Amino acid sequence: MSEQKRGMHGIWTGRWTFILAATGSAVGLGNLWKFPYITGENGGGAFVLVYLACILLAGIPVMLAEAMMGRKKRMSPINAMKELTTEAGSPSFFRSIGWMGALSGFFILSFYSVIAGWALVYVGKLASGAMAGITADASGAAFGAMLADPAGLTIWHTVFMFLTGVVIARGVNKGLESALNILMPILFVLMLILFGYSLTTPGFMQGFHFLFDFDFSKLTTESIVVALGHSFFTLSLGMGAIMAYGAYMPAKQSLGKTIMWVGFLDTLVALVAGMIIFAIVFSNGLEPSSGPGLMFVSLPIAFGTMPGGIFFGTVFFILVSIAALSSAISIAEPAVAWAVEKGFTRVKATMVICSVAWLIGLGTVLSFNEWAEYKLFGKTFFDSLDFVTSNVMLPLGGLLIAIFVGWFMSSDMIKNELKMKNDTLFAVWRFVLRFISPVAIALIFINGLGLL
Ligand code: TRP
C-alpha cells in the first residue's frame, strides 16, 4: 500500500526545478507585500536584523530538515510523518507535524487568496491607465475604496482560488514547472528595473536607513515574535510545503546547496522589495506603518510617474499575482497530496480543498469592511488568522521538526539522504537544529503566547 504511494505524484524533471519550485513557493506575497508592511509596523532596522537572524538560525536549518524528510519518503507530509516516526521510534505526537501542517495550509491559503485577489485588481487598475500621475492621497483612497467593496473582493478572491485550483489539478510537472521556468526570471528583471527607479527617488536613503539602522529601543516582544513567524512564512516552513516539494526532488541532487540558494534568493527579494517600497514611501510622505496597504498604495505612485510606468506597473502586478500563485499551490499541496494518496483523484481533491479554503477566505474579505469592527483580542478575523498561523502554528511545526530531526532521526538515516560531503557542515547544521533552533523558537514562542 505505502509503496504505491511513494513517488506517485511525479518528480521534478530538471536539475533546477526544485530550486525554482521551492523559490516559487518561498517568494510570494510574503516578500513583496507582507515583509515591507510588517517591517514598517515594527519600526524598521532592528526588526530586520532579528528577521535575518531567524532566517539563519531557524529558517534555513528547518528548511533543510523538511526537504530531507520529504525526499526520503516521497509522499505527502501526513503519510511521510507516519513512516518516519515509526522508523525513528519517536513518540507518535510528532505525526502532528503532518496534520497540523495541512490545517495551517487551509487557513493560510484562505487569506492568501484574498490578498492575491488585490494584486489582480491592481493589474486592471494599472492597465486601464487610472493610476497615471496619481497622488499619494488618491492612491490611498483607491486602496480604501477597493477594501470597502466586499463583492469585488470576493470576485477576485474567487478568480485567484480558481486559478490556483487549475494549476494544482494539472499536477506537478504540467501545471507548475513550465510556467515557473519563464516567470521567475521575469520577476527578477522587473524588480531590478524598479530598484533602479527607486535609486533615483529622493527618499531612497531615508528608506535605506529605515531598513538597516538598528535601533533596538523599537524592538518589542511582539516584533520578535512577528519576525520569527515571518521567517517561517516567507520560507514556506513549518507546515509541510517544503516537505511535499522535497518529495518530488530527484534523488541525486545535493540538498544543502539547493536550500542555501532558496534561502538566499528569498531574502534578497524581500530586502530589495523593502528598499523599493520604502524609497517610494519616504519620497511621497507616506506612513511606513500604514499596514497591509503599504505596497498597494506606494507602488502605483511610482508607476504613475515613471516613464513607461503604465506598462511596467501592469507587468509588475501580473508578476505579483504569479508569484502569489506559485506560492499558493505549495500551500495546498500537502493536503492535496494526502487526499490523492487516500484515493481521491487529483481534480476532486483540489476541488474540495480549494472550496473549503475559499469559504474560510470570505471571513478575511469581510474583515476589511462589514466585520471590520468585530475584534477578537483586538484583532480582526484576518489579523487573528494571520497571527495564529504565522506566529503560532508555523513556529510550532518548525519546533517539532527541529526536535524530531535533531533528536530522533539517526545520523545515518539523515546522512544517507542529504549526501552532504562535508562532515563539518553536517555537524554544524545538526548542532544548530538540536540546540539553537528549538531553544530560540521555544523562547520566542512562549513569549508570544503571552500576547494572545
Ligand atoms: N512563502 C510564501 C510567501 O512568502 C507563502 C507560502 C507558500 C507559505 N507556502 C507556504 C507560507 C507554506 C507558509 C507555509 O508568500
Image: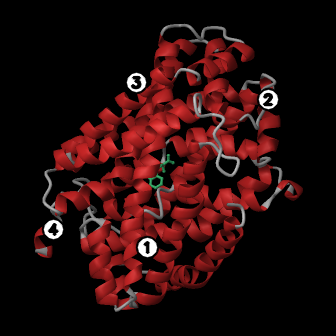
Label 3 or label 4, whichever lies nearer to me, is 3
Q: Amino acid at mark 3?
A: Ile
- Image location of residue 205, percent across then percent down: 81, 35
Residue drawn at (25%, 64%) of the image: 250
Between 92 and 83, the residue placed more toward the observer is 92
Q: CA distance from mark 2 to mark 1?
A: 40 Å
Instruction: Tell me: residue 115, above or below residue 346.
Output: above
* Three-letter code for the amino acid on which mark 2 is drawn: Phe
Please state if 93 lies on the left or on the right of 211 as rendered. left
Other residues around mark 3 within 10 Å, as few (<14) / some (14–19) / many (≥20): some
The amino acid at mark 1 is Ala
Residue 318 in which image quadrant: top left
Q: Are marks 2 and 1 in contact (CB under 8 Å)?
A: no
The CA span between labels 2 and 4 is 53 Å
Q: Residue at x 65, y 24 (%)?
A: 297
Which of disc 4 and disc 1 is earlier in sequence?
4
Q: CA distance from mark 3 to mark 1?
A: 39 Å
- Reading the chain from its start, which is encountered first: label 3 or label 1? 1
Name which of mark 2 and mark 1 comes first in the sequence: 1
- The residue that label 4 is drawn on is 5
Mark 1 closeness class: few <14, some 14–19, many ≥20 residues within 10 Å: many
- The answer to whether residue 184 of the structure is visible from this angle is no
Q: Is mark 3 within 8 Å of ligand 1?
A: no
Q: CA distance from mark 1 to mark 4?
A: 21 Å
User: What residue does disc 3 label?
Assistant: 155
Q: Earlier in the sequence, mark 2 or mark 3?
A: 3
Q: In this rendering, does residue 398 appear at all?
A: yes
Which badge, 3 or 4, is on the more N-terminal residue?
A: 4
Q: CA distance from mark 2 to mark 3?
A: 33 Å
Residue 273 relative to residue 127: left or right: right
- Residue at the disc numbered 1: 65
